[in-house]
Image: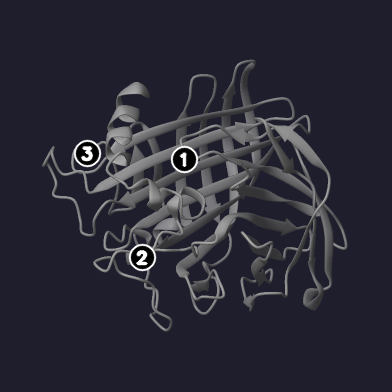
């Protein structure tokens, strides 16, 4: 299916969303949740494998995978695969009912090289079999798939096959987890603002990755590491939060860090972090423990973007600088943002991924 057909579907659906809602925070994520939508509750236990599947009573949800890869000649690459679910009203779609559009699906895929950032987008509605997440675990939109290949007695996300194809790229990757799932915040309850907005949030940050990238110059065999984020909520931002800077960092020591800063209209910066030991033991850090300082900028898509950052977590002895593989890794999608692989140097060396939204 061509991109223009699902784009028309999504445009029609978005037309039903009031402009005032879309203006609340990046991509409307700060809009107050309608009373019919569920909101995350502190103390609610996450349960697997059920929570790998959709939560249609919540307004927004995503399955978000990034991978830092390299070829045999040392050339570095990055890969992104994302499926977003957004609900116009709560509740599950009715299978086979073409008029049921309460769920909107959006997929993003990208390959970043030192010289290029190749991306594509897929848009779909629920109820017609064009996109979804089902059990046994498979997430898909059109012919893009994230499918479990794990044994029946294992967690479905322990092993996955990942495919996507755009106009100038494709990839076919195999991922094997070497560590446990990691819950962020308070056992998966991740606070996003001083006012208490929150999401349910967990990750699988321990993937070994291998496979093939298909690029304009030909096929490239790659290996590396991957990180899957799962998150759902009905109002993950407050109305005055304009965007975020999110980091997933993997260090040569085997430790990892998830950290983000949410930028507020008054200049404030709400931060949160999870320090992940090599064995998967997590330590959560609340607002203020993580320090994010922007450095060098680049002009990207008519915007000034801080593509280098100083990241500090003093409680863990962390003081590093991140630099992008490609400063122009701009996702010119329906809701645009910067997303790309980064190198880490300083107190800890390693690699990771950076996502920045709300730079208009």
Residue at the far left in the pictured view: 97
Q: Is residue 123 left or right of residue 338?
A: left
Residue at image mark 2: 51
In whole angstroms, how far apart are the C-alphas of marks 3 and 2? 21 Å
The first of marks 3 and 1 along the sequence is: 3
Res. 222 mark? none
**Residue 99 at least partly seen:** yes
Q: Position of residue 83 (x, y in %)?
A: 41, 45
Foreground residue, 37 or 203?
37
Residue at the far top in the pictured view: 217
Kind of element beneath mark 1: strand
Residue at image mark 1: 162
Q: In the image, which is nearer the foreground, mark 3 or mark 1?
A: 3
Q: Position of residue 163 (x, y in %)?
A: 45, 35
Please identify the quadrant where the C terminus is shown. top right
Residue at image mark 3: 129
Q: Position of residue 72 (x, y in %)?
A: 74, 32
Q: What is the quadrant of residue 214 in the picture?
A: top right
Q: Position of residue 336 (x, y in %)?
A: 54, 38
């Amino acid at each position: 299916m061509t991109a223009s057909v699902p784009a028309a579907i999504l445009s029609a659906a978005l037309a039903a969303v009031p402009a005032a809602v879309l203006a609340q925070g990046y991509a409307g994520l700060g809009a107050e949740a309608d009373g019919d939508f569920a909101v995350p509750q502190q103390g609610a236990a996450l349960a697997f494998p059920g929570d790998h599947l959709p939560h249609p009573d919540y307004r927004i949800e995503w399955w978000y995978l990034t991978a830092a890869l390299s070829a045999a000649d040392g050339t570095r690459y990055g890969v992104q695969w994302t499926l977003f679910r957004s609900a116009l009203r709560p509740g599950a779609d009715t299978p086979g009912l073409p008029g049921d559009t309460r769920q909107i699906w959006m997929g993003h895929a990208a390959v970043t090289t030192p010289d290029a950032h190749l991306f594509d987008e897929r848009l779909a509605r629920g109820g017609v079999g064009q996109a979804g997440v089902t059990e046994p675990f498979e997430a898909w939109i059109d012919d893009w798939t994230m499918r479990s290949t794990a044994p029946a007695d294992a967690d479905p996300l322990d092993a996955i096959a990942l495919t996507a194809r755009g106009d100038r790229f494709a990839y076919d990757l195999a991922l094997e987890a070497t560590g446990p799932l990691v819950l962020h915040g308070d056992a998966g309850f991740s606070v996003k603002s001083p006012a208490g907005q929150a999401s349910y949030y967990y990750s699988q940050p321990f993937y070994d990755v291998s496979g093939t990238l298909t690029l304009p110059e030909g096929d490239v065999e790659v290996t590396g590491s991957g990180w899957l984020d799962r998150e759902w909520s009905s109002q993950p931002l407050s109305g005055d939060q304009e965007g975020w800077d999110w980091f997933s960092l993997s260090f040569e020591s085997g430790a990892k860090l998830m950290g983000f800063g949410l930028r507020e209209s008054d200049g404030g910066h709400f931060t949160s972090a999870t320090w992940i030991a090599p064995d998967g033991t997590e330590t959560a850090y609340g607002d203020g423990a993580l320090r994010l300082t922007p450095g060098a900028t680049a002009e990207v898509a008519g915007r000034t973007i801080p593509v280098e950052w100083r990241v500090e977590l003093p409680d863990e002895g962390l003081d590093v600088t991140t630099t992008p593989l490609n400063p122009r890794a701009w996702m010119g999608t329906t809701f645009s943002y910067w997303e790309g692989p980064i190198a880490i140097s300083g107190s800890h060396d390693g690699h990771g991924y950076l996502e920045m939204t709300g730079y208009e």
